[in-house]
Amino acid sequence: MSRRTVYAWLVLGALLLFPSVTSIAADTPNEFLQLVVKLISDSDREFRAAGLDHVRTSAGGSEDTKLFAGRLPELDPAAQTALVSALADRGDPAARPAIVGLLKSSADESVCTAAISALGKLGEPADLPLLMTYLSSKSAAEQAAAQASLTQMRGEKITKALAAELSSGSPTTKAALIEVLADRRASNELPAFLTASVDDNAQVRTAAMAALGQLGSAGQLAALLPGILKAQRGGERDAAEKSVALVCSRIDNEDDRGTQLIKALDAVDMAQRDQLLSLVGRVGGKKLIDFVGQIATAGDAERRKLGIDALSKWPDASTADTLLEIANNTKDSAERSQAFQGYVKIAATRDKRNDGQRLDRMKQAMQAAKSNEEQLLVINRCRTAYDVETLRFVFPYVDKAPFAETACETIVELAHHREIRDPNKVEFNKALDQVIAISKNPEVVERANRYKRGETWERQAKAAN
């Protein structure tokens, strides 16, 4: 606490001892509250903080709350924002009318955002229409605050009122309401989410599928599949598949999971069923490997491509042998490349296997590799096997021109893990010296130097496009 803040509190204490000081606001009931009101309006941030702290913690009743809230129109936007937040923390609904009035009259984004947030704690059903208007605000902060407040407001009446609005409103509002209802765990609204999952608007569909992923059950699998088929290929389709896979994951028994998913697929038109193979890959399980493997080795080349893609999305390495067999036996170069890449990806997955088992798969892949590109892929993916034996496997490639830079990158990724670097300092330092001498990548060289000194390194976040 700074000296000025301490001083502010000393002034508060002093006024309690000297009740003759009454000039601050003659119409307020006592000198202490007068000073709090004065401090709230003070231009000094620390004096203001002392007053706001009293607003939050004072045991006074609703009349005190109204006194503090009544000063909102007199303050500048920064002070209004701070006082609204303090009143929200105070938790007395008596402040609500003043906050609603401020929200309707203010054009300042920070003030409005604070007022919207405060209604999550202090609001009532009558405030829903006002809050919902901010779900489509041009301000992202106001949108987020409105969504958070609608989620926070308690009561089944609130949930039903929000659900009633799903049939109207803009796509942005509908999507936001679906997210709010999902966060409120409104499982009674699953039929409305299912309808929204095949909406013509991608934003609404995406929100609905995410909500179904959170709240859906195994009994609804067949009803969830049209939402995947409706989703646009790419990011939306991927997200929809992940939501349905999340529902499947709640079926504890792996065989039951596969049986119920196959049953749901049987209800889909044959012409569309293959489009759902990617989902099967995300769900995984031994029972589904044969189901997809037959398609991945069938006579139709397009179906084989879909099957290989599904096998490559398995959540563990159980499809590795199937993919490697396809890669080794196919006569089609594109199919070979797809299956080999899928094998390396699956073999490197950090599942329940140990790091030695992951490395064994990488060695197997290197033996099967038929080009520099395939060997580079293996060297790159070795970084998921956190073992000193991986360093020993990759290190010789530092001296081979086509593979040197990728090998350097993998070595620094392995060195990032102190639990394998520290017990094997001599070997790692030798390898890092080679990286420093050979790599043309400044970041890789910097990391190598840091790890040699026993320092840490934090991965830089990618800049937004």
Image: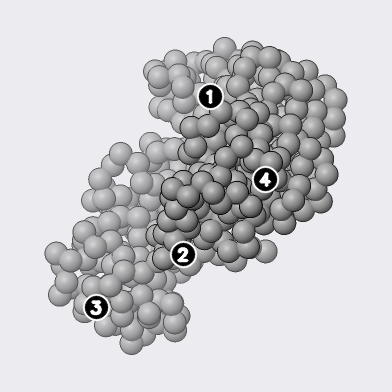
Q: Residue at x 82, y 22 (%)?
A: 167
Q: Are marks 2 and 3 in contact (CB under 8 Å)?
A: no
In the image, 63 versus 407, the foreground residue is: 63
Q: Are marks 1 and 2 in contact (CB under 8 Å)?
A: no
Q: Which marked residue is nearer to the observer: mark 1 or mark 2?
A: 2
The amino acid pointed to by label 3 is Arg
Q: Which residue is mark 1?
A: 247
Residue at the spot 58% in from the left edge and 64% down from the top edge: 44
Q: Is residue 15 above or below residue 445?
A: above
Circle 1 SS class: helix
Amino acid type shown at disc 1: Val
Q: Amino acid at mark 4?
A: Ala
Given residues 41 and 296, the one toward you in this image is 41
Please name the residue that numbered disc 4 is placed on: 26
Work out whether mark 2 precedes mark 3 in sequence or the reverse, and give the earlier one. 2
Residue labelled with disc 3 = 453
Q: Which residue is tagged 2?
A: 4
Picture coordinates of residue 303 (x, y %)? 63, 36
* Foreground label between 3 and 1: 3
Dot 1: within a 10 Å radius of its alpha carbon, few (fewer than 14), some, or many (20 or more) residues? many
